Image (cartoon, grey):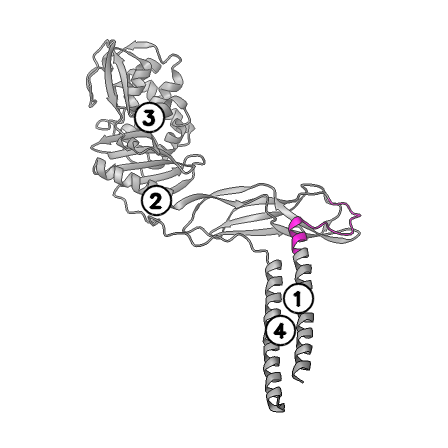
Amino acid sequence: MTYGSSSVLKSSFLKICFSISVCILIFFISFLAFLFLNPEDIYGEADKAAYNDEIDIEAESAVILEYDTGNILWGKNYSKSMHPASTTKMMSSIIAIENIDDLDEIVKIPKNASGRNHSIFRFRTGDKISLLDLIKSSLICSHNNATIALAEHVSGSVEDFVKLMNAKAAELNTKNTFFQNTSGLDDESADHKSTALDLAIIAGYCMKNELFREIVSTREDIIIINDKEIGITNTNDLLSFDYIKGIKTGYTTNAGFCIVLYSEKDDLKLITVILNNSSVDERNKDALKIINWAYNNLKYIKVVDSTQKAATAAAVGNTELYLDLYPETDYVELLNVAESKVEIKPNIYSNIDLPVKKEEILGSLNVFLNGQKIKEINMISLESVGDDYIYQELSAEEELKTRLIIISLLVFYFLIILFIIVRNLFIKKIA
């Protein structure tokens, strides 16, 4: 082997050695960085929503509420005073249910409740029917005179019964609602008005009653008048969707086509109100549009997990050590997955002294939604720590990281030694 070729070979070998050294160094640094990184949970960008928040509907007024909390999720003119038509029967029926002891009692139709009165079948004075069937007639097939018969049975007169309706509206804090009759007919009741929001609140209250829930979710039923069976069909044809469980439709010339709906899907319960549509088809289309918007965009997300470390705090006693702090409780929030930006900011108390008691509050976790603070949760220590501690016991995760670091160091030094041995052998061979 000539001197020149030996020099070239040495030069090439040194370049290779340098490259290998750089690769080993990069690997080592990257590995350590990975071990020490402790990223928070990151949510990727959500799929594009099926509907934008600017939902285009024809109805003059609408609102959608979360049933469990009453929170307004979306709305259009929902505080505007409107004629409620037969959605009024939600209130007249719940008042009857709450004030009648024996719903199986058979009563006679009074004179004031006789006739058709814009209903699908006629009552005659003296007809015998159970109070329960009167409530079914009111809620399922929207019989106007059924509400009059109920009112006179409960209060003796429609006027006194309407007072109970308005008292209940006031109790529910529906400030923009005033009832003048039991059915919602408004030709002679110009001030008989409510709002989409108020009707949603009333619906939410009514749906807490088990009998009410059962009746408004019934598509077809049988009532008995004078021992004769009569089939009735629900005016709410959206009950054909399995996630829609009620509640009530309505129509007058002044009110237009209206509907109040209760729905359940993916653990999300909604109350939806649509007021003053031009047709049944448009009403149903608008209702489904905003309901589907909600189910496509709104999800329950566990924003704070009490099993996950939220922060680390320094505690001082005879020695200084670091404590892992955890949220005191979980926090689940209904979020618009396409638009909601959640930030979690820990606030650790200053001057934490040892000893520390188990579950002692050592700070707070502030949750911000789109820049606005929505929740504050205490941060606690899961273990008690005495003042005589001179070290902090490693968690399982930290212990694993420590072992991996030691192993990586050993591997690194082994590779270096191996590299030096191979290099020396190679140099001797080419010398």
Query: Which mark is first along the chain, 3 or 2?
Result: 3
Position of residue 182 measured from the top left corner of the image (x, y, whole percent): 29, 23
Marks 1,2: beta carbons within 8 A: no
Apparent side of residue 315 relative to residue 147 in the rendered image (left or right): right
- Mark 1 lies on residue: 412
- Mark 2 lies on residue: 293
- Mark 3 lies on residue: 216
Q: Quadrant of the C terminus?
A: bottom right
Position of residue 48 measured from the top left corner of the image (x, y, whole percent): 36, 52
- Residue drawn where x is 39% and y is 46% of the image: 297
Q: Quadrant of residue 73?
A: top left
Within 10 Å of disc 3 (Cα), the crowding (few <14, some 14-19, many 20+) is: many
Query: Which mark is first along the chain, 1 or 3?
Result: 3
Query: Which mark is first along the chain, 4 or 1?
Result: 4
Within 10 Å of disc 1 (Cα), the crowding (few <14, some 14-19, many 20+) is: some
Vertical relation: 217 (above or below) 350 = above
3D distance between C-alphas at marks 1 and 2: 55 Å
3D distance between C-alphas at marks 4 and 3: 76 Å
Give the magenta range. Answer: 385-401
Give the mark toward the camera: 4 or 3: 4
Vertical relation: 37 (above or below) 257 = below
- Mark 4 lies on residue: 21
- Residue drawn where x is 41% and y is 35% of the image: 67
Give the mark toward the camera: 3 or 1: 1
Find numbered disc 3 in the image and state the secondary structure of the residue it sits on: helix
Hey, what amino acid is under mark 3? Val
Q: Quadrant of residue 145?
A: top left
Hey, what amino acid is under mark 1? Phe
Question: Is there any visible trace of residue 318 in the rendered image?
Answer: yes
Query: Which mark is first along the chain, 3 or 4?
Result: 4
